[in-house]
Image: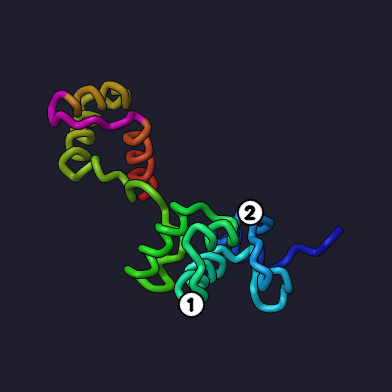
Amino acid sequence: MAKPDPKRERLRRHGLLNPHPQRVQAPWFRSGEFFDAHDLVQTKYEMLRHVRVDGATKAQAAALFGLSRPTFYQAEAAFSREGLGGLLPRQRGPKGAHKLTPAVMTFIDDRRAREPSVSALTLTQEIAATWALTVHPRSIERALARKKKR
């Protein structure tokens, strides 16, 4: 059995592994010397460079590097905004329980102090009635578990 490649393992662990390295058709990635089709950041950077320096069209570059045109445009905007760091993958969506503000958590704590067995579903309904805020019961359960951990 082949020994796992430590670089690929690091790329995977950090979310930087290209899910489709076989789609990269750029000849300079095939030599295996310096360019690595498994490295998503390097692949995106080279795609952008191919347009800016080599004069390829955006569609040609996206196809050559096995990425979609929307991915090209996202990478281009991120690179213009943040430089090389903009090509690093980011977590999508809200970061944390943004609806469960300190006031809402105080409400939940007070409600649970009065009735410890109150369900998360009941709490969501009461939060909706009080604040006109839609919160998923699982969000409340996770917030309570985090609070309990502390």
Q: Position of residue 61 (x, y in %)?
A: 53, 63
Q: Mark number for residue 20?
A: 2
Horizontal and vertical percent position of residue 41: 52, 67
Give whichever of 93, 105 is nearer the camera.
93
Magenta residue span: 129-137
Indicate the secondary structure of the residue bearing disc 2: loop
Q: Secondary structure at mark 1?
A: loop
User: Quick check: 56 left or right of 99?
Assistant: right
Relative image position of residue 94 (x, y in whole percent): 32, 47
Q: Is residue 113 magenta?
A: no
Relative height, residue 144 to residue 1 (above, below): above
Residue type at mark 2 is His
- Residue, disc 1: 53
Nearer to us in this view, 89 or 24: 24
Residue 35 shows in the view: yes
**Badge 1: residue crowd in 10 Å (few <14, some 14–19, many ≥20):** few
Question: Of the residues tagged 1 and 2, which is closer to the observer?
Answer: 1
Identify the image's colour scheme: rainbow, by chain, secondary structure or one colour. rainbow
Q: Residue furthest left?
A: 130
The residue sitting at the right extreme is 1
- Name the quadrant of the N terminus: bottom right
Q: Position of residue 46 (x, y in %)?
A: 54, 71
